[in-house]
């Protein structure tokens, strides 16, 4: 009689070998997942059913503590509602989802910026969401640092001329959209060459830094009730600066400039046991309908020119009979120098 229950030793050994290989592979995959520098969640039925070590580190909680929670528990409420809709779309369309610059908050209150990649996949016969979180906090901090450097004058730590071109264009567009006033003031330190000749460039640098400090303090005071629409200080080049003043009409801009001019004249700059006196000449203009940055700047510059030509240490508002002589007209150069200032 044939024995149907004989042992196939060779087949049994092969099956055992295959099982061991699968077990080894599973163990290695588990180790890889735990060592991944990316947070990994498995979401099922609106809860976390698996989380790796990196995800626990990001959120400041142990892995077991994450089970049964929801990723949205660590996202601001306003952002969570938007994320919820995107995850719903993920399951409806079965397409990968990638979200940039999502802010999450750990249990100790630390905020992190992450990039989320999510996809739908089967898990024990049930569709789940696999969610990957890449911590890009340090990358974003570095990007912000480099951006700040690119828009900042290194000496006075106010905004530089290249950023003036962008901000002025943005404010012109916003002023037209909101039907609001926009004023531009250009100020120039009087007799700055004499200051440099007397006190050296180090003394001149201190004067410029002090000037920016006074201007910033004044704008903070004026815009204390409207920080989102605050004015800004820009160094156009050398001893010349610009103030962009959103929401200020002609009389308001005149009043601000008068007060600022007086405050600057009243506050000397302390340098090497001496006080360096400082005055400024200022010209300001109001944005006109259909006007671009160049024309706006040119009119303020013509007002500044007349302030300097008629005695300095004064404020002049642009009017129709003021214009720049051809030899002083600004040319389209990044440094903003006038012809007589160029080599």
Image (cartoon, grey):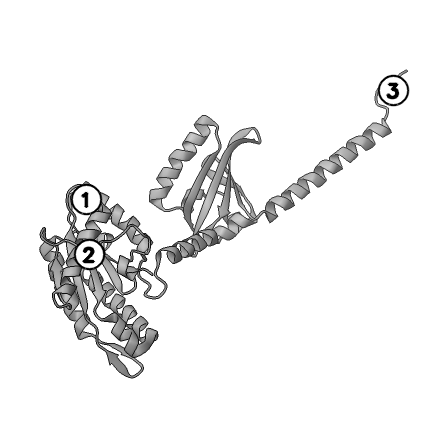
Residue 274 left/right relative to 88: left
| Element assignment for label 2 | helix
Q: Quadrant of residue 193?
A: bottom left
Of badges 2 and 3, the one in the foreground is: 2
Q: Nearer the observer, disc 3 or disc 1?
A: 1
Asked whether the residues under the numbered discs 1 and 2 touch, taking CB atoms below 8 Å apart as contact, a structural biologist would say no
* Residue 30 vertical position relative to residue 302 in the rendered view, above or below: above
Q: What element carries label 1?
A: loop
Residue 100 locus on image (x, y percent): 43, 42
Q: Residue at x 25, y 68 (%)?
A: 211
Marking on residue 3: 3
What is the distance, in whole Å, between disc 3 and disc 1 at their CAs?
100 Å
Residue 47 horizontal side relative to residue 284, left or right: right
- Mark number displayed over residue 291: 1
The x and y percentages for residue 273 are 29, 84
Quick one: which residue is furthest to the right in this view?
Answer: 1
């Amino acid at each position: 009689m044939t024995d149907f229950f004989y042992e196939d030793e060779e087949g049994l050994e092969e099956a055992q070998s295959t099982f061991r290989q699968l077990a080894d592979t599973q163990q290695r995959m588990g180790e890889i997942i735990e060592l991944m520098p990316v947070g990994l969640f498995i979401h099922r039925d609106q809860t976390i059913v698996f989380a790796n070590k990196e995800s626990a580190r990001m959120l400041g909680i142990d892995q077991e503590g994450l089970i049964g929670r929801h990723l949205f528990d660590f996202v601001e409420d306003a952002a969570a509602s938007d994320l919820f809709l995107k995850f719903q779309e993920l399951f409806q369309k079965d397409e990968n989802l990638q979200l940039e610059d999502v802010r999450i908050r750990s249990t100790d209150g630390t905020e992190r910026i992450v990039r989320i990649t999510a996809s739908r996949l089967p898990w024990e016969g049930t569709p789940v969401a696999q969610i990957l979180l890449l911590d890009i906090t340090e990358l974003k901090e570095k990007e912000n640092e480099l951006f700040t450097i690119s828009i900042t004058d290194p000496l006075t730590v106010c905004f530089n001329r290249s950023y003036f071109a962008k901000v002025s264009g943005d404010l012109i567009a916003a002023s037209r959209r909101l039907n609001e006033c926009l004023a531009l003031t250009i100020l120039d330190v009087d007799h700055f060459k004499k200051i440099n000749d007397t006190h050296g460039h180090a003394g001149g640098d201190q004067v410029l830094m002090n000037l920016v400090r006074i201007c910033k303090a004044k704008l903070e005071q004026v815009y204390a009730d409207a920080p989102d629409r605050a004015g800004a200080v820009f160094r156009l080049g050398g001893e010349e600066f610009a103030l962009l003043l959103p929401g200020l009409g002609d009389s308001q801009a005149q009043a601000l400039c008068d007060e600022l001019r007086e405050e600057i004249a009243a506050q000397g700059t302390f340098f090497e046991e001496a006080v360096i006196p400082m005055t400024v000449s200022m010209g300001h203009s109001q944005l006109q309908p259909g006007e671009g940055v160049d024309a706006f700047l040119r009119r303020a510059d013509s007002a500044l020119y007349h302030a300097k030509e008629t005695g300095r240490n004064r404020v002049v508002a642009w009017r129709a009979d003021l214009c720049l002589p051809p030899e002083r007209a600004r040319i389209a150069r990044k440094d903003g120098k006038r012809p007589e200032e160029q080599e």
